Each structure stands twice: as structure tokens, then as C-alpha cells.
Amino acid sequence: MTLENLNIVPFVSVDHMMKIVLEIGVEETLGGIADYIEEDFKRWEFFDKTPRIASHSVEGVIELMPTSDGELYGFKYVNGHPKNMAEGFQTVTAFGVLSDVSNGYPVLLSEMTILTAFRTAATSALVAKYLAPKGADCMAIIGNGAQSEFQALGFKTMLGIKKLRLFDVDPAATEKCAANLVDKGFDVIQCKTPQEAVEGASVITTVTADKQFSTILTDNMVGSGVHINAVGGDCPGKTELHKDILTRSDIFVEFTPQTRIEGEIQQLSDDHPVIEMWEVMRGEKKGRRDNKQITLFDSVGFAIEDFSALRFIRDQLQRTGQYQNLDIIADPDDTRDLFGMVMRAKANL
Ligand code: NAD
């Protein structure tokens, strides 16, 4: 079956996804997805944009993230449940769909738990390319869970980060992260406190999971000239930075209406100025102005990034062959005889 058969939808399982990224290479996948995200952010006005549709519970959140560029439609289903980790489940799991706008037929169904980690790191590193201080080679990563190695490798690929200073409240997470990165070309230091982790780092990534306002970074920990990549605060009531850091920083976001609800800036008034990254990528607004400025990427994850990541994966299918065909679109011989098709299937029971 070819990818062009409308009734058969290519499905990328977790196993396929791992084989695709290993075949292409982890750093090449990060770079490739970042290129697709940059391309899509630069054609911002073509996209339908809406804050994601969230269903909150005491334990976490389940969200749908739709967008369309008029030719393709995409959405991601994703959850965020900080308590899952203690129960042996992922904090974040996801799958997604791309469809052809012209007839509404799906053209790809894919796992997105792994792909989300790639697209989040690709976005962070892409943004840092515009905002991080020149020559940055040392990054602190606070929160050494599922996303952390992807973040490290994204910043290595796109910024040349060579030194990592890791901290997690759970030393086993730091140990895991350091072990996974041992042969990846980093100089890794495992730190005992977040204060120790940020020492000498020109980029600070916070990627912790806690369903509440927490203070991972206090104002005194952030020196001038630093770029902060704040990834973990991505829900109403869930932030990582002390408010005083926000008022000292120039704040960059993906899509302002969503970030006002979910990002660090929920701590600020609704008219506090922020810059959307597509404006910086198109050269319409300045990113980093000087080496004293504190830049903050208030990352929450936006639907266009998932759309771009799905587009990237779809473009790898013919070459890698890593998909299976799914029979999820009913195709009666006579399009109006859906019932007849069901009845005729009796013969095969
Ligand atoms: P995870 O549960 O695998 O890892 C989180 C880590 O944070 C754990 O190791 C935990 O011990 C550590 N931690 C918790 N509180 C801490 C603290 N006070 N100081 C230091 N470490 C602390 O989760 P994950 O999949 O790595 O995701 C991390 C966060 O990133 C989640 O909140 C998730 O919702 C968010 N996320 C954001 C985006 C985005 O686009 N912005 C994308 C994916 C995930």
C-alpha cells in the first residue's frame, strides 16, 4: 500500500518512532524538527491559532492542541500528570494526527510521547539561537526527568552547549540523566543544589514537574546576561520562577493568549509586554539586544510545533519505511452504502 491510498492511514508506533530517530540520528532529528518549526513560525499568519483545549482534574490535565495552515490540519492529544512518575507512568504522553484539509481524510496517525520531547527541545534550542548570549557553552538543567536529555542534546546541536550542570530534587534522576549523556560529548557536573547548578551557566533550563506554583529559581540565582529556558510551568497554577525574575527579564512566548493562561506570565498583569517568537524569527522584533539583558523563553508548547513535528515525521516515512498501514477509514464501494458494506461483512464472519 502506498502513502497515497486515501483509505489507508500510515501509523507511526512508538517502535517505529524510535527506529526513525535512530536511523536519522538524534541530533539530526532535533535539527530537522527545529527547521520545520522555524519554517512554520515564519508563516505565522497562515495558521489557525487557538489556546489549547484543556480538561483539568485534581491530578493533572488532558489537552487537545489543534491547528491548520489551510492545507493540512493537525492536532495532538497530550496529558500532564506530575503524580504519574511516582506510580511508574509517564508524566506526559501524547499522540497526534495530520489530515488533508481538502477532503478531511487523515494522512498520518503518530505516537507523540517521544515526538513531544523532540519538538519541545527543538523549540527551546531554536528559540535560544535567537536569545542566548553569544558563545554560551554552559547550561544548567534543573529537573532531570524525561525531557532533560532531549533538551541537552537540542542545545548541543543548535548552540554548541558543551558543559551541563544538572540538578533534580531526586538524585536518581540526575544520575540517570548523566548516565544517558555520558558518551554524548558533554562535560557533565551533578549538582547538590539549584544554586550550585546555575553557577557559571549562561543558559538555565527549568524542566520540573509539579502541579502548583513552585519557585525553582529565585531572583538572586539569576545574573545579568543569562537566558532562561522555562519549560516546566505549562498549566494554570503551575509555574517555576519567582515573579521578581519576570520583571527583570525580556519575556518571549510562543502564542500570547495561551501563555497568559499557562505560562510564567500568569503571575503578571495581562498587559505586561511580551514578544512572540515568530516576530523575532522574521526579524520584525529584536531578540537579544546586549550582553546584560536577561532573556526568558516562557515555553508552554504550542500546536504549531506539534504540526511541524508531525510534518517532519511524515516526510521521513517513504525513506525509512517505518510505519504500518491502518484500516481506520471505512470505504464502501458505493460511498452511500455504508450499511450495505456492514451487512456484506457477515459473509466473512
Ligand atoms: P518528569 O516527571 O519525567 O521529570 C520531572 C523532574 O522534575 C523529576 O525528575 C522531578 O524529580 C523533578 N523535580 C520536581 N520538582 C523539582 C524541584 N523543585 N527541583 C528540581 N527538580 C524537581 O517530567 P518531564 O516529562 O521531564 O516534564 C517536565 C515538565 O515539563 C512537566 O511539567 C511537563 O508538563 C513540562 N513539559 C513542558 C513542555 C513544553 O512545551 N513547555 C513539553 C513537555 C513537558
Image: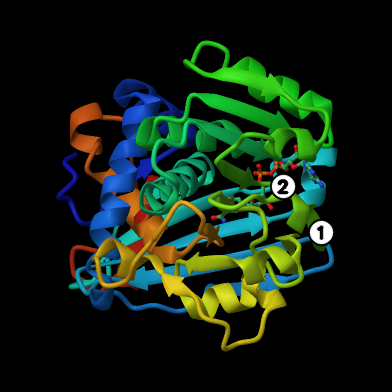
Could you tell me if residue 349 is visible in this image? no
Residue 171: percent from left, percent from top: 82, 26
Residue found at x 84% / y 37%: 169
Q: Quick one: which residue is furthest to the top in this view? A: 183
Of residues 241 and 41, the one nearer the viewer is 241
Left or right of 285 in this view: 52:
right
- Describe the colour scheme in one phrase: rainbow
- What is the secondary structure assignment of the residue under circle 2? loop
Kindly identify the residue that appears in the image at 66 percent across and 53 percent down: 232
**Residue 149 position (above or below residue 41):** above
Residue 55 percent across, percent down from the top left? 67, 73
Cα gap from disc 2 to disc 1, whole angstroms:
10 Å
How many residues crowd around disc 1 within 10 Å: few (fewer than 14), some, or many (20 or more)? some
Q: What type is the residue that disc 2 sits on?
A: Thr
Residue 221: percent from left, percent from top: 73, 48
> What is the quadrant of residue 113 in the picture?
top right
- Residue at label 1? 214
Amino acid at dot 1: Ser
User: Considering only vertical position in the picture, is 233 above or below 158?
Assistant: below
**Residue at the disc numbered 2:** 208
Instruction: Report the number of numbered marks.
Output: 2
Question: For the residue with label 1, is its CB less than 8 Å from the closest atom of ligand 1?
Answer: yes
Does the CB distance between marks 2 and 1 fall below 8 Å? yes
Residue behind label 2 places its C-beta within 8 angstroms of ligand 1:
yes
Residue 314 visible to the viewer: yes
Q: From this view, report whether residue 55 is shown above or below residue 190.
A: below
Q: Quadrant of the N terminus?
A: top left
Disc 1 is placed on an element classified as strand
Q: Is residue 223 above or below residue 40?
A: above
